Amino acid sequence: MRNISKMLLQSAVMATALWTMAGQGPASAGSADHTDKVMSVQFEKRHVVKVESGDFHFKPGQRAPVHTHPAPAIGYVTKGTIVQEVEGQAPILLQAGDVFYEPAGPRIMMFDNASANKEAVFIDVNLQQKGEPFIVFPTPPTEAIDRRTLPETNYKNGVDVDGVDIYDHVIQPDAKQFLDVASPISGFVAEGSVTIWVDGKRKQTVKAGSNFYLYQDGEGAVLVNGSSKRPAKVIIFKFHKA
């Protein structure tokens, strides 16, 4: 079992600080509606036919086995603290409210719960070509992994994608947010709930901890926070059509 030394954690904290200074760290919610781009990633063009999502719950101190992602993976930490190390890169410390990227190909050396006494929870979204699995373990895991399947979406004719922009939307009580859905979108409601309207028609209501997908030419979509008391926080993963 791998040990996380004090020096490694200090390095991770420093890397995270630099990452945040570069404009890729978590956005803080203010008193008004706001939209922040918190990360943008590029990768080789791929013909995506399925977007698969998982909700992972790691026990205190739980470590992920070394693994790879055949498809690029993006995600969001909803609770706790994660240490992430991509092969060939310095480890970083992810806090609740942070987004992350796991590239296709390199081994993910660490994606571990950094806390010895608190649970860590994160979602993971994979942009898969035909026949690609969600994740690959070179060695079968020796510890059970609590992965709770979230709704997936399939594109019948596929979509050519070469990157993702990630946005943090905070929608105040009784307010709404317009979304351009000319490119595919995967959304995750981190706080509160929103009702989604597409071209003037009510589509669905999504509560905290659940996800949704949008992709339609036309007028676009509107996220409505129907609460008169609580803001809603929505993480949007918008794919780059190649």
Image: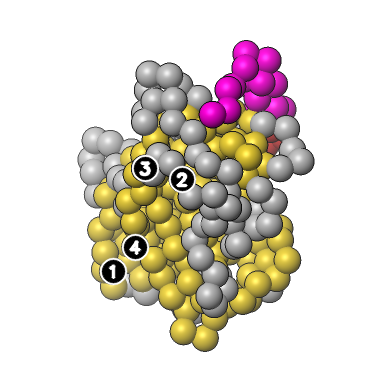
| Alpha carbon distance from label 2 to label 1 | 39 Å
Residue identified by numbered label 4: 151
User: What residue sits right under mark 2 in the picture?
Assistant: 141
Instruction: Return the residue nearer the eye: 217 or 48.
Output: 48
Mark 4–mark 3 distance (CA, rounded to whole Å): 22 Å
* Location of the N terminus (image quadrant): top right
Quick one: label 2 or label 4, which is nearer the N terminus? 2
Can the viewer see residue 4 in this picture? Answer: yes
Residue range (magenta): 1-18
Specify whether residue 52 is painted magenta.
Answer: no
Q: Which element carries disc 1, helix, strand or loop?
A: strand
The answer to whether the residue labelled 2 contacts the one labelled 3, judged by CB atoms less than 8 Å apart, is: yes
Quadrant of the frame with the C terminus: bottom right
Total numbered badges shown on the rendered structure: 4
Q: Is residue 113 left or right of residue 12?
A: left
145 versus 13 height, above or below? below
Along the line of sight, which residue is nearer the eye, 54 or 64? 64
- What secondary structure is the stretch in magenta mostly built from? helix
> To which quarter of the image does residue 129 belong?
bottom right
- Name the residue at 47% across, 78% down: 155
Q: Which residue is mark 1?
A: 203
In contact (CB < 8 Å): disc 2 and disc 4: no
Query: Disc 4 or 3, which lies upstream in sequence?
Result: 3
Q: Position of residue 38 (x, y in %)?
A: 60, 43
Q: Which amino acid does the dot numbered 3 rest on?
A: Ala
Which residue is tagged 3? 144
Q: Residues within 10 Å of mark 4 (few under 14, many from 20)?
A: few
Tell me which numbered mark, 3 or 1, is placed earlier along the sequence.
3
